[in-house]
């Protein structure tokens, strides 16, 4: 028997393994146009996965670099280096059409001022230094309101070192006096509070959900056109190669595709990284210099992708017996067993159930390993169970049209390949459903619904001690276009004892009527909102400061009138106020004290009404704060939630794009493999429309099964993870419907994109054979 090409004389059994790998790579390179097409599809699929993995490997460095600059911009010390004079600084926040703007008021005290990072000259009174993004916004056609709000002369732009990211909206305003903090040194290391369990789980599950499908896509891309590869391997068996050698040759083909995919993904990463600064997704943007993949993770990707590709190819041959006279798998699909396919999902469920046990020590606050393994194994159940379930669905008898018959017979011959292709979609869908439920739970705690105002209502809070400026604002607000009413009250703190404080609002009857449903009102009356801990006739103390939890504060003794009536709140404007009084009841010593609160109603259809309100309050600088529906400025855990949410949603867009691209690659590959049967059917008179519908069914059936499995898995994921972090289980059924519908829509888009390939495959020239 003659030894296979490339092997030394003396029999195939003495081939070195490296020679087998090289032979597989050479056969893939010399397989003609069909082989080149298969190799190109595999390389594109793997390259797309590598591109996503490289960006994921850069996420930690980008986050740390951004956080380091954020610390340098928000943390200051009054100690200045020799020869440098501290700067008075006040930090504030503003908004414009859903975008957060950080405002820093600065005042130089003489000498050489301590400059903020990225600022070459400290702005004097009436001057400003803006970030490039805010400068573009202000100079654009929609920036007229911002220019009115900040009429100062812009003397420069903030440099790279003074920005968290390229989309950072930031402005330094020079003022006559700022008070506040003394900034002698900018950029201190800040102590960050630990991430709450719910947000931590959201972050961990989000990362796993978004990255795990990438590996599924890489494995599926490495197994494209298995049938053609098996025929080549059968030829090797015919000329004397052993079964072990054939498997190594198959692994060599996959290693070549993986190597070229690594080069393609790395090249795309280097080409797209300089362009990333111009891309803003969900208000999230990073500097290209920050996108640096960690070297250990790069090494892991370089090793893991070829091993995954080779392992996937070898795993595909486990039920295939390649003999010199043919491939056994061509006689019929293998009968798939269920028991071992359920093991990953069952193990994942067991791990997540284990997390439901009460914590016994502090080390269980962050069970990273158990949570990650539980989520990974539960999601792994989708690609393992899907081929078995798809095979069972296809074997059920039904009345079929011709197009459906063509699709089901093709799927029955090889149900594993389409199941592998759509398994990535299933994993993304299950992860998206679980993630949406986690986001919904987090939004209920940290999102705009926690303390937000409904559309059409806004408040302006003004610090005490500014009577003239406050009076000017009170006169200006009713004249703002879009404002329908504006009522002014004075806010004070009521200490009711036992370290408990509530808010008191003092105002005329028309102002109090905007806060509560009053049966009648005359000056000299008091009202208690329903649920108020204050009782009529109770002895309390009035303090002009805002509500605090630092303990009892010295104040003016006051007795709640015994005739105070309990009333119902008229809306969210009174969400903090518990006691309402008319001015006549206030003690003379506190009547002029406290901060001013303006409760405003505006036309919600006018999108710029809130912006005009903010512009009217702008002369009060940091001494005023405007709150309205959909306010984007949040702090603490709310800010952490929004940062995580934006990062996950932005990453999900890339993952979904990769899922659609992989499904398209798989569909094109299936059409390419069937070009001879399709051409024969077209030549025998079968309409092309019927063939196109068969391709649609061939994509739709696996996706429908995948959606069913993914919905069940995603709901289970949400029901298991949320209780593990101390949150009641909930399912975002709206998200389930949206994501499931989106997955079905992908089928239509992919089918439409494959129609040119179907048209090409059904031409008579496709009957030619090389």
Image (cartoon, rainbow, N blue to C red):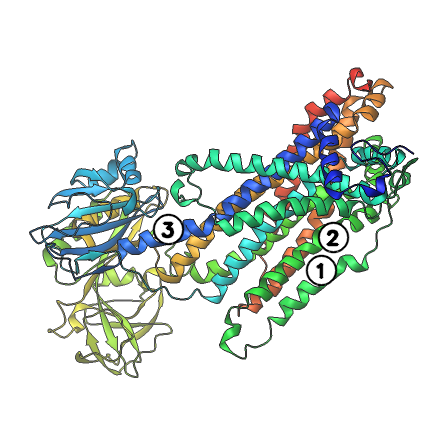
> Tag on residue 65?
3
SS at mark 2 in the image: helix
> As drawn, is 724 to the left or to the right of 121?
right
Q: What's the CA distance linking mark 3 and mark 2?
A: 39 Å
Q: Nearer the viewer, residue 685 or 561?
A: 685
**Is residue 630 among the parts visible in the rendering?**
no
Q: Residues within 10 Å of mark 1 (few under 14, many from 20)?
A: many
Q: Which residue is mark 2?
A: 384
Q: What's the CA distance linking mark 1 and mark 2?
A: 8 Å
Q: Quadrant of the C terminus?
A: top right
Residue 147 place in picture, x, y as percent: 22, 38
Q: Which residue is mark 1?
A: 344
**Numbered disc in front, either 3 or 2:** 3
Taking the spot 67% from the left edge, 52% from the top edge, the residue there is: 710
Residue 396 place in picture, x, y as percent: 86, 46
On the image, which quarter does residue 265 sit in?
top right
Residue 63 place in picture, x, y as percent: 41, 52
Taking the spot 68% from the left edge, 23% from the top edge, the residue there is: 756
Say above or below: 26 vs 442: above
């Amino acid at each position: 028997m003659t030894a296979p090409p490339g092997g030394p004389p003396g029999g195939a059994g003495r081939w070195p393994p490296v020679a087998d790998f090289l032979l597989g790579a050479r056969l893939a390179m010399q397989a003609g146009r069909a082989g080149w097409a298969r190799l190109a599809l595999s390389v594109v699929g793997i390259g797309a996965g590598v591109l996503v993995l490289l960006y994921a490997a850069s996420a930690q460095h980008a986050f740390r670099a951004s956080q380091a600059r954020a610390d340098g911009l928000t943390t200051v010390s009054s100690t200045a280096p020799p020869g440098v004079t501290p700067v008075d600084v006040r930090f504030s926040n503003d908004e414009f059409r859903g975008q957060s703007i950080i405002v820093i008021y600065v005042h130089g005290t003489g000498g050489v001022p301590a400059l903020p990072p990225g600022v070459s000259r400290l702005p004097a009174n009436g001057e400003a230094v803006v970030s490039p993004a805010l400068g573009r916004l202000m100079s654009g056609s929609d920036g007229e309101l911002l220019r009115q709000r900040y009429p100062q002369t812009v003397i420069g732009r903030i440099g790279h070192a003074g920005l968290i990211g390229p989309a950072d909206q930031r402005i330094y305003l020079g003022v006559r006096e700022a008070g506040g903090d003394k900034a002698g040194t900018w950029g201190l290391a800040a102590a960050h509070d630990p991430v709450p369990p719910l947000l931590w789980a959201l972050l961990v599950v989000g990362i796993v959900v978004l990255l795990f499908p990438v590996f599924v896509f890489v494995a599926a891309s490495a197994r494209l056109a298995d049938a053609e590869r098996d025929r080549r391997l059968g030829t090797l068996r015919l000329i004397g190669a052993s079964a072990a050698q054939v498997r190594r040759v198959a692994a060599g083909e996959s290693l070549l595709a993986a190597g070229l995919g690594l080069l393609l993904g790395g090249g795309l990463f280097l080409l797209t990284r300089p362009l990333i600064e111009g891309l803003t997704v969900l208000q999230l943007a990073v500097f290209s210099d920050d996108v640096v993949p960690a070297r250990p993770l790069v090494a892991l990707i370089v090793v893991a992708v070829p091993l995954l590709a080779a392992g996937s190819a070898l795993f595909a041959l486990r039920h295939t017996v390649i003999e010199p006279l043919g491939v056994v798998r061509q006689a019929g699909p293998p009968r798939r067993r269920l028991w071992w396919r359920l093991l990953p999902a069952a193990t994942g469920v067991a791990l997540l159930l284990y997390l439901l046990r009460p914590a016994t020590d502090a080390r269980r606050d962050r069970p990273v390993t158990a949570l990650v393994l539980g989520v990974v194994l539960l999601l792994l159940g989708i690609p393992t169970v899907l081929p078995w379930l798809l095979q069972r669905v296809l074997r059920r008898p039904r009345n079929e049209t011709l197009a459906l018959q063509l699709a089901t017979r093709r799927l029955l011959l090889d149900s594993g390949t389409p199941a592998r292709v759509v398994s990535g979609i299933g994993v993304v869908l299950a992860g998206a459903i679980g993630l949406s439920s986690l986001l919904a739970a987090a939004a209920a705690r940290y999102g705009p619904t926690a303390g937000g105002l409904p559309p059409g209502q806004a408040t302006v809070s003004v610090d005490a001690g500014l009577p003239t400026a406050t009076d000017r604002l009170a006169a200006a607000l009713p004249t703002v276009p879009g404002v329908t009413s504006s009522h002014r009250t004075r806010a004070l703190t009521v200490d009711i004892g036992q370290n408990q404080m509530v808010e008191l609002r003092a105002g005329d009857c028309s102002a109090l009527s905007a806060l509560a449903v009053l049966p009648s009102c005359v000056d000299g009356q008091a009202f208690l909102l329903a649920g108020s801990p204050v009782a009529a006739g109770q002895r309390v103390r009035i303090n002009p400061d805002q509500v605090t939890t630092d303990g009892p504060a010295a104040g003016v003794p006051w007795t709640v009138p015994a005739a105070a009536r309990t009333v119902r709140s008229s809306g969210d404007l009174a969400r903090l106020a518990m006691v309402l009084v008319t001015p006549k009841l206030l003690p003379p010593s506190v009547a002029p004290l406290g901060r001013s609160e303006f409760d405003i109603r505006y036309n919600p259809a006018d999108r710029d009404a809130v912006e005009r309100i903010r512009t009217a309050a702008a002369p009060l600088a940091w001494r005023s704060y405007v709150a309205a529906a959909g306010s984007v400025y949040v702090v603490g855990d709310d800010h952490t939630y929004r940062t995580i949410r934006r990062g996950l949603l932005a990453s999900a867009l890339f993952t979904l794009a990769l899922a659609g691209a992989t499904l398209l690659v798989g569909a094109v590959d299936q059409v390419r493999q069937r070009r001879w049967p399709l051409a024969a059917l077209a030549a025998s008179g079968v309409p092309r429309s019927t063939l196109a519908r068969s391709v649609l069914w061939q994509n739709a059936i696996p996706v429908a099964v995948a959606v069913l499995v993914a919905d069940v898995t995603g709901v289970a994921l949400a029901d298991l993870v949320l209780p593990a972090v101390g949150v009641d289980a909930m399912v975002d059924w709206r998200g389930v419907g949206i994501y499931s519908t989106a997955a079905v829509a992908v089928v239509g888009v992919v089918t439409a994109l494959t129609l040119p390939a179907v048209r090409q495959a059904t031409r008579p020239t496709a009957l030619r054979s090389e």
